[in-house]
Amino acid sequence: MASVTFDAVTKRYGDVVAVDSLDLEIVDGEFMVLLGPSGCGKTTALRMIAGLEDISDGTLRIGDRVVNDVDPARRDISMVFQSYALYPHMTVQRNIESPLLARHYHLDGPDQPARKLTSAERAERVAEAARVLDLEPYLKRKPAALSGGQRQRVALARAFVGRPQAFLMDEPLSNLDAKLRAQTRIELVDLHRRVGTTVVYVTHDQVEAMTMATRVAVMSMGKLQQVGTPQDVYAKPINTFVAQFIGTPPMNCVDAAIAADGTAVDLGAAGRLPLPAGLQARPAAGAPVVLGVRPEHLTLDPAGSLTAVVRAVEWLGHECLIAADLDDRLVTLRQAGMAILEPGAEVKVAVDAADVHLFDAETTERLT
């Protein structure tokens, strides 16, 4: 196992900056998820760890070793791709064993030269990987005879069998259906807990990030936006991009202003909300701000301080989503059960000041 450290790492393709001065320390043994939309630089960052992309500037370390110019085969990492990349003519057993055939390992002590594994040692490792990932019944099959989830587990076993310092995973669940994705998420988290190897996992799916990660690194336009536990990133997004990228439905972010008396957030005809506690610096009266509230924190309440007009109600079985206008600002409310409301109905909405987020209207950075 090993840590992975980006120190001002930049990747350029001509005039295009794919990763811009990335500073990120991935701690030994943690499950780090690089999260962001397509084109944000997350896969490029992963490929630089693997050695599949050259580094334009900065320093990349795996453990204590600088690996900027180290060949991919000598980095002691394993990578799982979205496409599985299995050998179709080989059995599952041979696919899992394939990384062990060419590599050399220090098995006889630090002072002894590295050597290839014997056939018995290879068989032992393949058996262990198959047992961990529940592939023992399929070892003699070829990939064409497996389901998508089984193929993905074979790809994971092939990465696991070499016992690398780090696992790199590039959207490995994106080809699976929803039920299988949920099941495989649990298997991956369980595998990480048992093995304890450093995992760097790339995805655009924030559900995967929230349910699997030890920490999440949110990226946009090649820049790192925020790093933290899923709970911290959800509860205290550093800017409006993170606020609206994390969460389903995303955080409501609407234009507002500080009231003339400086004690509340003014939403025009929709009403006012008290300023949240913990403001780093109180904005001046009349200053434009962006108000952020999670859908689950907006509640229908006859005593609420905000007035909204219902636009639509979507029933999802266990809950419903209410789209409403706050003085021409569209917001979403999440309510348990079913709300019997007609489009055009006027309702009162309440929100606790502790659940209000304020962002600077110009920089989009968090004020609270």
Image (cartoon, rainbow, N blue to C red):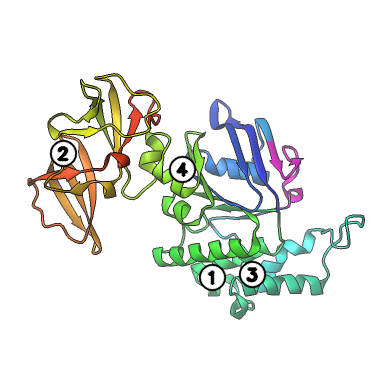
Nearest-to-viewer mark from 4 and 3: 4
Q: Quadrant of the C terminus?
A: top left
Residue on which disc 3 sits: 89
Q: Calculate the distance from the C-alpha at mark 4 to the C-alpha at mark 3.
A: 36 Å
Q: Is residue 119 magenta?
A: no
- Relative to 242, does residue 318 appear above or below in the rendering? below
Residue 37 pos. (x, y %):
44, 42
For label 2, the SS is strand
Residue on which disc 2 sits: 306
* Magenta region, residue range: 60-76
Residue 69 pos. (x, y %):
75, 38
Mark nearer the N terminus (2 vs 1): 1
Nearest-to-viewer mark from 3 and 2: 2
Residue 311 pos. (x, y %):
13, 46
Question: What type is the residue that disc 4 sits on?
Answer: Gly
Mark nearer the N terminus (3 vs 1): 3
Q: Is residue 62 visible?
A: yes
Q: Which mark is residue 150?
A: 1
**Callout 1: 10 Å neighbours few (<14), some, many (20+)?**
some
**Callout 2: 10 Å neighbours few (<14), some, many (20+)?**
many
Q: Quadrant of the N terminus?
A: bottom right
Q: Calculate the distance from the C-alpha at mark 3 to the C-alpha at mark 2.
A: 64 Å
Left or right placement of residue 106 versus residue 69 in this view: right
Q: Nearer the viewer, residue 101 or 66?
A: 66
Question: What type is the residue that disc 1 sits on?
Answer: Gln
Residue 355: image quadrant is: top left
x 14%, y 34%: residue: 270
